[in-house]
Image (cartoon, grey):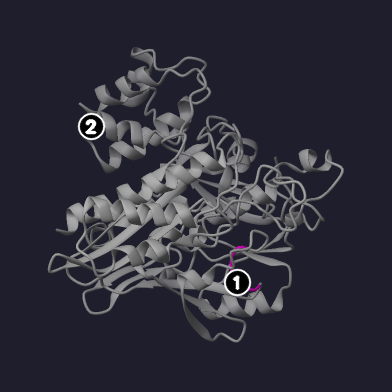
Amino acid sequence: MKQLVELKVNGESYETAIDPHRTLLEVLRENIGMTGSKEGCDLGACGACTVVIDGKAVLACLTLALEARGKEITTIEGLAKDGKLHPLQQNFVDHGAIQCGFCTPGVIMSAKALLDENPKPTQVEIKRGISGNLCRCTGYTKIVEAIEVTAK
Amino acid sequence: MRLPKFEYLEPKNVKEITSLLKKNEDAILIAGGTDILPKMKQRIVTPKYVINITKIEDLKKIEFAEKKGLTLGSLATLDNISKSKPVIEKFTALAQAAGRVASPQLRNMGTIGGNISIESMCMYFNQSHEWRKGRPHLCFKLGGDRCFVAKGSKDCLALFQADTPPALIALGAQVTIVGATGKEKIINIEDFYTQKSKKVNILKPTDFVKQIHIPTPPKGTKSCYLKMAQRAAIDYPIAGAAACITVSGGKCKNAGIAVTAVGSGPLRLKEAEEVLIGNSITDELIEKAADAAYEKVRPMPHFNISAWYKRKLIRVLVKRSIKQACSKAK
């Protein structure tokens, strides 16, 4: 049976009627229309669907939308403010850390959660922080560089 | 892949969990959801009711007191455990094991209760519905009559690969299980496992894990968990070993050694422990303990890992974990 749910995404409230078996990723993409978070493996192994919930990076494909009620959800769409890119996004562009771009929203959300918790991470900590995100283009060096520059 | 349809329930306290489990047959509990949701997507389990217990704040605590020891609510996340100060200082092996599970995102979601009750994994079982449908027979784990891991096997041979159970066994943890009557039962974590791949733990459909308790280790105790995996993250161990050593007056007073990913459950290696207890620890003695571990384990080949390699790896990991624990214990 459908339930009326209020989700707080990027500081704004969205009300939508959903079945309990819908994941947060499905609701974000299909009901709310935020297609920034990507569906990769859909089984929790790739990190493409990473969003930040209450300050922690989690996988939207393995979170039930009903579970996310009353929590602060941040997606890639919530980073740019007033038409200006978030420093992480800008550095990803400047350093060529985007190849095909499919993993980028997930990596940036992982990096954001990491930098919010630890503003000055070492290179090892950065690599560990984004270890849950697979980049099929294998462009990890530039991703790590972009995050390092942002942390400086 | 979409999830199958189900009804969603959200208990607010521990009592409600028991009553919901008793009232609704074919219900499953979900906390982190990192193990059960993929299996539901693959239609391995299709419960009628899903009971989300994550709203119960009582079960999320990580409490430590010198006298009482460490109490972990079953909903404490692996990330919080691996970063908790008392756990890192006094229960190092657990912090290391929790910090090596899967990836940062999965550690933020996954709970200790879920990690210890995780099912065994198998490449013939953890597959999509379409994949499994393509095979003419069902395996033991899906209610069939054969095992694809080893032809002619009379039992399921899926591999148990969780990281935290060997650390908890080495540290002497106890699990509190709440049963159908609401009565609590406290058991040693070794007795939590059946050593049968088809049903890895002793939990009945109406049972759930409430908390895990580890007594404060005596002075001079140090522990260590080592994991070998093909990748540094998002991977199960090829093998993992935990050692907890108490050194007093130059001699080993107590030892706990356990390994994972060698069979149908986490394995405590009493033979290796006995080699150490009562003796002063030298490199030779550690070699002997590692040999005892090598003699005890009988792993199956898994993916591209041969049984021979895995057995040798256990010897190395047991040796190194004892060495690392001892180097800190002195």
Give x and y (percent) for residue B182. Answer: 56, 85
The residue indicated by pointer 1 is B203
> Is residue A72 among the parts visible in the rendering?
no
| Residue displayed at 21% across by 72% down | B218
Q: Residue furthest right?
A: B136
| Residue displayed at 72% across by 52% down | B44
Corner quadrant of residue A131: top left
Image mark for residue A140: none
Q: Residues within 10 Å of mark 2 (few under 14, many from 20)?
A: few
Which of discs 1 and 2 lies nearer the camera? The answer is 1
Give x and y (percent) for residue B267. Answer: 48, 61
In the image, A136 versus B69, the foreground residue is B69
Relative horizontal placement of residue B63, taking residue B7 as reference (left or right): left
Write the start and end of the magenta stretch as one range: B200-204
Quarter of the image where the C terminus of chain B is located? bottom left
In the rendered structure, are the residues bearing label 1 and label 2 in contact, judged by CB atoms less than 8 Å apart? no
Q: Does the magenta-highlighted stretch encompass residue B203?
A: yes
Tell me: residue B181, above or below residue B213.
below
Tell me: residue B105, above or below residue A48.
below
For badge 1, the amino acid type reads: Leu
Relative horizontal placement of residue B30, taking residue A94 as reference (left or right): right
Q: Residues within 10 Å of mark 1 (few under 14, many from 20)?
A: some
Quarter of the image where the N terminus of chain B is located? top right
- Whole-number angstrom distance, CA of label 1 to CA of label 2: 43 Å
The residue indicated by pointer 2 is A122
Give x and y (percent) for residue A71. Answer: 45, 53
| Residue displayed at 64% across by 55% down | A4
Give x and y (percent) for residue A18. Answer: 67, 50
In the image, B239 versus B253, the foreground residue is B253
| Residue displayed at 23% across by 58% down | B85
For badge 2, the amino acid type reads: Thr
